[in-house]
Amino acid sequence: MVTASPLVVDARRYFRLGTPNRIASTLRIGLSEHCFVPSLDDLDSDWLASVAAPAFHILARTRPAARRQSFLSIGTGCGLDALGAVEILGSGIIAVTDVFADIVAAARSNIVTNLAEGTTIALTAATGDLLGPLAGGKPRFDVVYENLPNTPIAEPARLADRQTAAGYLGSRSEAMPAFVRQRLLELHYLTLQQVRPMLNPGGAVLSTIGARIPLASFFDLTASSGYAARLLTYGWKKQAGPDEYIPGYVAMEREGLGPFHFYRVADVQAAFAGLDPEQAGREALDIEADLAAKRLTATEALALHGSGTGIAHTFVALLSEPA
């Protein structure tokens, strides 16, 4: 069921636009039970506004229009990502999936009702696991976007009773390289595997991922799946819900997974000072090396958070293209 009182979103502010041409200037976004709630009061904390939308703008600037006409979001949430693709990328063929039927219904409604007058799109909205609900139709896409969870939940028994859009849901049964499981990259790996036959020539996968693991892991991920990759952006965010999410990483560390890297907010502020995310993406390996001495394990980060220290992590926008 979609909420009766929709969120009101200023599209210009949220997506960093001038005057929108293809979507409404004021978006009315209905949320269902399992939808992750956008952080409209603090857009620096909102993942789509602060991480994905800047990457969309880079794609719009660097990819020909013909190579961004069809767009798929895997794990769409409330559909704001698809509306961003319609406006920023100019996409006219849109597909969205999610594992919850109520999310998919909300996303479909939000996308259709927030188009600008005169904008028409071909929309597919399907419920199921990763690419599964689209596999039978053999669709093809220019840009596939995914922001799938790699954040562990400390109390898996609570999953049935809580919103799970940001939570890592546990190991998968499919075969995959050991490092993928070791660094909680299962869903990203499976997406790259499953989506390859659905990419148009010149198509690409855009993954926005919390980078609490070494950057080399992302290049290992794409190479093991037969893709070449580059970092569109690199940046940092204050850890959201530290009391909820850092303990999950502590538990994973105790199981021998990782390594997981956290930082004091002051340390990443200094390391990224004066750099926009795109420039930081070009200098990412050097920044990571400079931060090496400042790394915190999840256990250390949780203890410092408990004493009042602000804790942060880095993120990447990773563009993967078939090699």
Image (cartoon, helix red, strand yellow):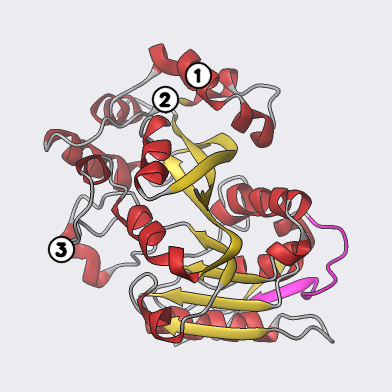
| Residue type at the position of mark 1 | Asp
Callout 1 secondary element: helix
Where is residue 104 drawn, in percent x and y? 47, 81
Q: What stretch is highlighted in magenta?
A: 17-29
Which residue does the numbered mark 2 point to in the structure image?
Answer: 263
Where is residue 26 drawn, in percent x and y? 76, 72
Callout 2 secondary element: strand
Vertical relation: 19 (above or below) 244: below
Check residue 118 in the rendering and tell me which mark sits there, or answer none: none
Vertical relation: 157 (above or below) 135: above
94 and 274: which is toward the camera = 94
Residue occupying the point 33% across, 22% down: 296
Farthest residue in the left direction?
A: 255
* N-term-proximal mark, 3 vs 2: 3
Q: Quadrant of the N terminus?
A: bottom left
Check residue 157 in the rendering and tell me which mark sits there, or answer none: 3
Callout 3 secondary element: helix
The reply to whether the magenta stretch includes residue 28 is yes
The reply to whether the magenta stretch includes residue 153 is no
* N-term-proximal mark, 1 vs 3: 3
Residue 266 can be seen in this image: no
Residue occupying the point 27% across, 30% down: 259
Q: Are the two marked residues, 2 and 1, in contact with CB atoms closer than 8 angstroms?
A: yes
| Residue type at the position of mark 3 | Ala
Question: Based on the displayed image, in which of its 4 quarters is residue 126 positioned?
Answer: bottom left
186 and 66: which is toward the camera = 66
Which residue does the numbered mark 1 point to in the structure image?
Answer: 267
| Residue type at the position of mark 2 | Tyr
Q: Are the two marked residues, 1 and 3, in contact with CB atoms closer than 8 angstroms?
A: no
